[in-house]
Image (tube, rainbow, N blue to C red):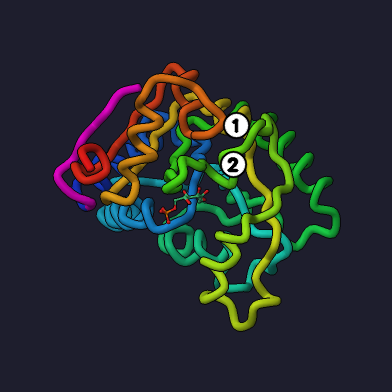
Amino acid sequence: MKIVCCNDYKEMSRVGAGMVAEIVKSKPACVLGLATGSTPEGLYAELIDMYKKGELDFSEVTTVNLDEYYPISPENEQSYRYFMNTKLFDHVNVDKANTHVPSGSAEDAAAEAARYESFVRSLGGADIQILGIGRNGHIAFNEPAEALYPATHVTGLTEDTIDANARFFASADEVPTKALTMGMGTILSAKKIIILANGKGKHEAVSAMLSGMVTTSCPASFLNLHADVTLICDREAYEG
Ligand code: F6R
């Protein structure tokens, strides 16, 4: 795993956006694998900036997101679809029809997971996958467990995650109890992966990932099996 240790969040976001921009410029019809969460917001802002300066063209780009709550409507402000529209898609010239997030409103969650998996596979995987990392080492909604799923699947949210998210929803019963998420194999099918981490809170997870061992107790450690992964982090995440 390559490591780029940056001074701060801004630099981390710039380096990450630079790597994404390189792909978009060299392959205009590329597939971008995207993540939600607070970590990549700065990277998306940098991409929007480059687009506004005329440096980037997203007209031929296809995007695939890692995950989505289930059940949730795309109009719900807490949905990952809403997040992507407002943080990136609405501000660049990507064709919305070419942006893909697992559907939180599909009738049959398992069928949607299977459909999404074959769709991502039919694209040949992402040309570059952007990842964040959870404090416990999760990537997408692949939480530490005795065994991990290779393909896109339906997963229950931990009590912790439900509690943490409750404040964002109008009422407790609006909090989705499940999610649709790419599995470890779907993520590893990307040709290139960048994983972003900032702040002391991520240090433990980053250290576990960098220990070199592969263990289901730190799903991010599976990235050690991939030939082209770059960790882009700030000093706090790297040094603690
Ligand atoms: C987001 C995702 C999550 C986040 C992770 C870190 O699509 O799949 O795994 O990357 O929870 O979240 P933040 O960036 O908010 O610290």
Of the two numbered discs 1 and 2 in the rendering, the one whose residue sits closer to the viewer: 2
- Which class describes the residues within 10 Å of circle 2: few (<14), some (14-19), or many (20+)? many
What secondary structure is found at the residue carrying circle 1?
A: helix
The answer to which image quadrant residue 37 occupies is bottom left
Q: Is residue 154 left or right of residue 89?
A: right
Q: Which residues are magenta?
A: 1-9
Residue at screen point 78% across, 39% down: 114
Between 78 and 64, the residue placed more toward the observer is 78
- Which class describes the residues within 10 Å of circle 1: few (<14), some (14-19), or many (20+)? many
User: Residue 108, percent across and down?
Assistant: 85, 54
Q: Amino acid at mark 2?
A: Asn
Q: Would you name the residue on which mark 2 appears?
A: 142
Asked if residue 156 is positioned above or below residue 120 in the image, the reply reads below
> For residue 184, which numbered disc appears in the image?
1
Between 210 and 116, the residue placed more toward the observer is 210
Is the CB–ligand 1 distance for label 2 below 8 Å?
Answer: yes
Q: How many marks?
A: 2
The answer to which image quadrant residue 113 occupies is top right
User: Residue 119, percent across and down?
Assistant: 71, 37
Between 152 and 190, the residue placed more toward the observer is 152
Q: Is residue 175 left or right of residue 128?
A: right
User: Is 5 colored magenta in this rendering?
Assistant: yes
